[in-house]
């Protein structure tokens, strides 16, 4: 049976790997992109995908964008894979930097989930939140990003209790450092040389996400940590 998934962050990294895997097996994709140009690019890359143009830095814009998209009445999953990171000490970080990371990494997932809950309930679907090791512990210069990811864990935990009785499964995936454009940006901010081969392949995280999605309905993977394997 073909399933329908709404996905953020499909343009690169973990989100792109998940999108390609789902499309490759014939599932229907609804991809949230930051603007019309990015939406057109993703639609061209993944044949048959439907796109929604909405900037996650402005979660208040999501309601109108979702309403205009004329989505199906049943959605099998929403996968939150988009994220941004800007490092800095608490003494240095601006209000704008805090606000953008909280908006993209936490408020937008909460709002998009809220908007899609009726369709998720109809399908007894699943919410998957791609979190981070920073969602479990915070290190110096990671305060804003880690705060957004700690909040994302809280969102998942509360949602699981609220919507579990309606048949919705909620899964949080905590990848360690993964070879993505975001990781390259982190290394740039840290002033370190980037070597993609030293980190988790995004395909491995995508496998973990699909495992949670495909688990029989008598069980749920609520929290899944993915760490680099031995080299």
Image (tube, rainbow, N blue to C red):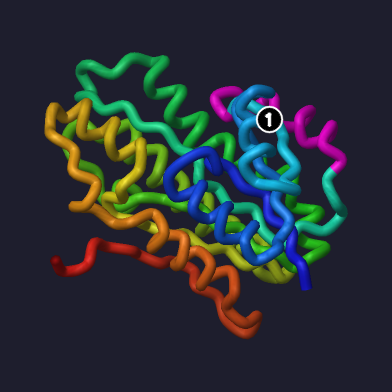
> Which image quadrant for residue 24?
bottom right
The majority secondary structure of the magenta stretch comes to helix
Residue 132 higher or lower than 1, as above or below: above
Front-most of 150 and 231?
A: 231
Image quarter in which the C terminus is found: bottom left
Residue 116 higher or lower than 206, as above or below: above
Look at 67% across and 25% down and name the residue there: 60
| Left or right relative to 134: residue 68 | right
Spot occupied by residue 211 in the image (x, y as percentages of width and height) = 51, 72
| Left or right relative to 195: residue 213 | right
Residue 65 located within the stretch drawn in magenta: yes
Look at 41% across and 15% down and name the residue there: 96
Where are the magenta residues, as a range?
Answer: 56-70
Residue 179 located within the stretch drawn in magenta: no
Image quarter in which the N terminus is found: bottom right
Front-most of 188 and 79?
A: 188
Front-most of 83 and 192?
A: 192
Spot occupied by residue 78 in the image (x, y as percentages of width and height) = 64, 53
Most extreme residue toward the bottom is 218
Residue 29 higher or lower than 183, as above or below: below
| Left or right relative to 183: residue 139 | left
Callout 1: SS: helix
> What residue is pinned by disc 1?
40
Front-most of 200 and 163?
A: 200
């Amino acid at each position: 049976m073909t399933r329908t998934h709404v996905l953020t962050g499909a343009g690169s990294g973990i989100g792109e790997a998940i999108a390609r895997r789902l499309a490759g097996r014939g599932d229907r994709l609804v991809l949230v992109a930051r603007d019309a140009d990015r939406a057109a690019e993703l639609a061209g890359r993944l044949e048959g995908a439907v796109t929604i143009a909405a900037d996650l830095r402005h979660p208040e814009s999501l309601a109108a964008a979702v309403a205009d998209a004329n989505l199906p009445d049943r959605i099998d999953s929403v996968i939150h894979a988009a994220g941004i990171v800007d490092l800095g000490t608490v003494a240095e970080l601006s209000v704008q930097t805090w606000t953008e990371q909280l908006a993209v990494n936490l408020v937008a997932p909460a709002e998009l989930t809220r908007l899609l809950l009726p369709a998720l309930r109809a399908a007894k679907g699943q919410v998957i939140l791609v979190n981070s090791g920073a969602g479990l512990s915070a290190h110096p210069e990671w305060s804003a990003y880690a705060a957004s990811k700690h909040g994302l864990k809280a969102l998942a935990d509360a949602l699981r209790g609220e919507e579990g009785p309606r048949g919705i499964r909620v899964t949080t995936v905590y990848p360690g450092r993964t070879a993505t454009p975001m990781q390259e940006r982190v290394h740039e901010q840290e002033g370190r040389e980037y070597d993609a081969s030293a980190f988790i392949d995004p395909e491995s995280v995508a496998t973990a996400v699909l495992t949670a999605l495909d688990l029989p309905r008598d069980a749920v993977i609520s929290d899944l940590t993915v760490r680099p394997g031995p080299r």
